[in-house]
Amino acid sequence: MAWESIWKSAISGLCGSIASTALMYFKSSAGILPSFQPYEHFQIAAGHLVGHDVHPNILWLVSFFNGSTAVGLFFGYLYPHLPGGNGASKGMVFGVCGWLIMNLLAFPLVGLGSFATAIGLGVWPAAFSLAMLSTYSVAMGLVYGALERPERKR
């Protein structure tokens, strides 16, 4: 991966993380789905994995860092191969794939069940997690697409 692609990936991943954090802040402030707290479930699972409690800020920082680096780099690598004619549509495809992975693998691993059905709130947690990942990935796609030079667009 060329340096140019790496910095675009990092910047777009950071912007996606900021957008997702803003949505989570809004969720908390507005009292939307107060019993759906996926970060708490991941925090508990991480605590079991390392053998002691993990401070919530540590998990948030790891998530923010991961979204700004590893996931951003992966998105940058996949960007030319993702379907869609612009950054937003490529981001949406990436986000839906991430949403499926989260809901079919990560949520069951932390006790929420597939599509967070184990918490008994119907489709709302799955719908909100789609909004959360779409916010992240579309913002990331928009920024990455804007940073692409016209002669490099595919």
Image (cartoon, rainbow, N blue to C red):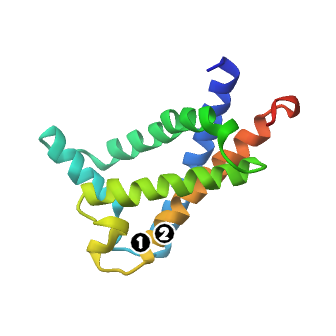
Name the residue beneath numbered marker 1.
125
Q: Where does residue 151 sit, x and y in percent of width and height?
A: 87, 29
Q: Provide residue 112's location: percent of width, then percent of height.
A: 28, 65
The answer to whether mark 1 and mark 2 are in CB contact below 8 A is yes
Q: Residue furthest top?
A: 3
Q: Mark 2 points at which residue?
A: 128
Residue 25 visible in rendering: no
Crowd tier of the residue under label 2, counting other residues whose Cα lies within 10 Å: few below 14, some 14–19, many 20 or above:
some
Which is nearer the eye, 128 or 1? 1
Pick the residue in front: 80 or 102.
80
Q: Is residue 113 visible?
A: yes
- SS of the residue at dot 1? helix
Residue at figure coordinates x 19%, y 46% from the top left: 47
* Residue 131 as seen in the image, left or right of residue 37: right
Q: Give left or right: position of 118 versus 78.
A: left
Quadrant (top left, top right, bottom left, bottom right) of the N terminus: top right
Q: Mark 2: which secondary structure?
A: helix
Q: Give, as a three-letter code, the residue at label 2.
A: Phe
Q: 100 above or below 146?
A: below
Q: Image quarter for residue 3?
A: top right
Q: Is residue 28 above or below residue 44?
A: below
Quarter of the image where one finds residue 82 = top right
Picture residue at 54% right of the left edge, 35% below the top? 74
Extreme right residue here? 151
Where in the figure is residue 7, as x and y percent of width and height? 65, 26
Residue beneath the point at 67% across and 26% down: 5
Disc number placed over residue 150 in the picture, else none: none
Residue 114 against residue 88 in the figure, above or below: below
Residue located 15% across and 47% down the image: 48
Query: Looking at the figure, which quarter contains the C terminus?
Result: top right
